[in-house]
Amino acid sequence: MVVHTTVTFNKAELLRLERDLKSFPKALPKVMQRGINDTLKTGRTKITREIGGHVTVKAREIRNRIKITKATRVVFAGMIRIASTKIPLIKFGARETRKGVTVKVRKNGKRERITGAFVATMNNGHKGIFKRTSEGGKRVPRLSIYELKGPTVTGVFEGAAGIATKVLSSLNATLTKNIARNVDLIVNRIRK
């Protein structure tokens, strides 16, 4: 799953920006780069908070799956990519019981029991919730195990009620504000 969206800076704003920086021609690339990159960071933070409001996983797990490609002084474009890898269920507050493992994935949902699952640490140090494959509906001890995983960050971002719309609609205003702030910084710094 890939989410495509564009945050734009309208022509009127760009003309005003060029007028403000007319006496500082080398400042425009720096202003655009900083404004776009600040907006990307703000976007990542907003996405992390919104998704964190729906699932019980720590913000660090969400943030690690959101990557930023920054703008440069030559290319005035940046990108926020949300990885579509599933989060291991162990990250959702897992508790091992005699009958299996319980996890709470959604903040507004109930704790669910996964019968027959167990918590184990692999030889490489990875800890997770595992379940043994079954043969004809019966668990056989010699069969392999597989790790249980939860939802993807992308799935929550697209699926939860209006997260994507809410975050992306606010980024245009944030971009305008960040660029205006950087213009003021450069103009004030050069005039001193």
Image: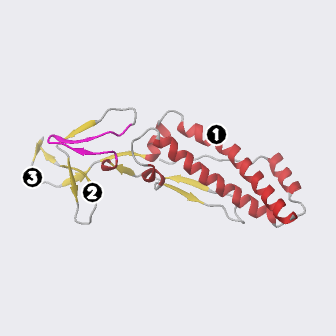
Give the total number of marks visible in the rendering: 3
With respect to residue 192, does 14 lie above or below? above
How would you classify the magenta stretch by its main secondary structure?
Answer: loop
Three-letter code for the amino acid on which mark 3 is drawn: Pro
**Which is nearer the N-term, disc 2 or disc 3?**
2
**Residue shown at 50% from the left, 32% from the top:** 161
Q: Measuring 14% from the left and 46% from the top, which residue is drawn there?
A: 134
Amino acid beneath label 2: Lys
Q: Is residue 159 left or right of residue 166?
A: left
**Helix, strand or loop at disc 1?**
helix
Residue at mark 3: 141
* Residue 186 picture location, percent across and down: 80, 61
Residue 132, which numbered label? none
Assign the C terminus to one quadrant of the image. bottom right
Q: Is disc 1 in contact with disc 2, using a CB cutoff of under 8 Å?
A: no
Residue drawn 73% across and 48% down? 177
Query: Where does residue 169 sit, x and y in percent of width and height?
Result: 64, 39
Give whichever of discs 1 and 3 has the lower sequence position: 3
Q: Earlier in the sequence, mark 1 or mark 2?
A: 2
The residue pinned by badge 2 equals 127
For label 3, the crowd category at 10 Å Cα-Cα, with few meaning under 14, some 14 to 19 and many 20 or more, is few
Residue 66, image x, y percentages? 50, 53
- Residue underneath mark 1: 169
Query: Residue type at mark 1?
Result: Ser
* Spatial separation of the CA atoms under disc 1 and disc 2: 38 Å
Disc 1 crowd rating (10 Å Cα; few below 14, some 14-19, many 20+) is few
Magenta stretch contains residue 86: no
Mark 2 to mark 3: distance in Å? 20 Å
Q: Secondary structure at mark 2?
A: strand
Q: Which residues are magenta?
A: 92-106
On screen, residue 19 versus residue 30, left or right, reads right
